[in-house]
């Protein structure tokens, strides 16, 4: 998939995140401080792959998750569809390498990474794109590499046109854990763990899901 045939809804996502990049970083960039389960899962991922492992943050936004992982000894590459987010990440987290790219065509070599995280990034894909996105994640992971995903649990689609006073056009797809698991298994992963939690008081009131999978 080249630049000329990027799906229209991907272009809308890119433009929407460009529009909110600075505000997003200001509001969301410190979110791990009040998310103990997320920190525990990310910490377990770093421990599992070992010091100096290469980790990709897929749909990295302003790079706050990548920065947290890098501070714990991993070598991070953040990938995001939004050039505004990539520029912000480079400014705020110089210890991380950032690349602009689409989840369906990652700018990375086969087997380049020991692990990957995708926190609330596949939520902007339509369901039919999930197998291809996870197949791309599988492609850039070594055999036995780990993928940790986070998502909103449910079956609804929320369409946002105003985001903190900025005009946007972006959809948020909620999914049941089983949908995520099936797409990951189809793409060449086996499931190590899956869980859900209630929202923290500081978050939007949506149930959160996580799946940890291993490339086979």
Image: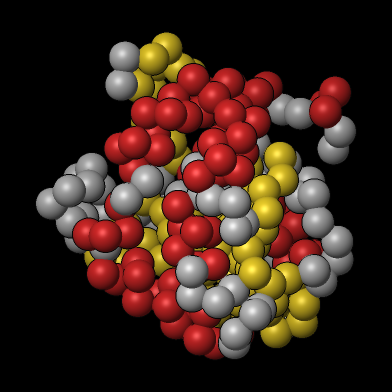
Quadrant in the picture for the C terminus: bottom right
Residue visible at 72% across and 41% down in the picture: 101
Judged left or right of residue 7, residue 5 is: right
**Image spot of residue 150 (x, y percent):** 44, 59
Residue appearing at x 23%, y 43% in the figure? 204
Q: Which residue is drawn at 44% across and 72% down?
A: 42
Residue 166 found in image quarter: top left
Q: In which quarter of the image is the N terminus?
A: top right
Pinpoint residue 50: horizontal percent, then vertical percent.
Answer: 59, 87
- The residue depicted at 80 percent of the width and 49 percent of the height is 107
169 or 127: which is nearer to us? 169
Q: Can residue 50 be seen in this view?
A: yes
Say if 106 sits above or below 54 in the image.
above
Counting labels gives 0
Q: In this view, does 182 lie above or below 41?
A: above
Instruction: Determine if residue 127 is in view.
Output: no
- Residue 93: image x %, image y %? 54, 51
Vertical comparison of 33 with 79: above or below: below
Most distant residue in the left direction: 201
Residue 183 drawn at (x, y percent): 61, 61
- Viewer-proximal residue among 64 and 203: 64
Front residue of 73/152: it is 73
């Amino acid at each position: 998939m080249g630049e000329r045939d990027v799906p229209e809804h991907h272009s809308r996502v890119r433009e929407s995140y460009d529009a909110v990049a600075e505000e997003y970083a200001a509001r969301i960039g410190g979110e791990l401080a009040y998310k103990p389960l997320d920190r525990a899962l990310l910490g377990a991922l770093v421990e599992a792959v070992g010091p100096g492992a290469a980790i990709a943050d897929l749909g990295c936004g302003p790079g706050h998750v990548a920065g947290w992982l890098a501070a714990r000894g991993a070598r991070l590459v953040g990938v995001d569809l939004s050039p505004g987010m990539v520029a912000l990440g480079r400014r705020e987290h110089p210890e991380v390498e950032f690349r602009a790219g689409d989840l369906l065509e990652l700018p990375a070599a086969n087997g380049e990474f020991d692990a990957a995280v995708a926190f609330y990034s596949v939520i902007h894909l339509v369901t039919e794109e999930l197998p291809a996105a996870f197949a791309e994640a599988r492609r850039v992971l070594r055999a036995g590499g780990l993928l940790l995903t986070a998502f909103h649990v449910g079956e609804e689609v929320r369409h946002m046109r105003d985001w903190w006073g900025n005009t946007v056009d972006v959809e948020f797809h909620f999914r049941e854990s089983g949908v995520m698991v099936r797409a990951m298994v189809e793409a060449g992963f086996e499931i190590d763990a899956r869980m859900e939690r209630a929202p923290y008081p500081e978050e939007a009131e949506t149930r959160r899901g996580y799946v940890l999978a291993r490339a086979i």
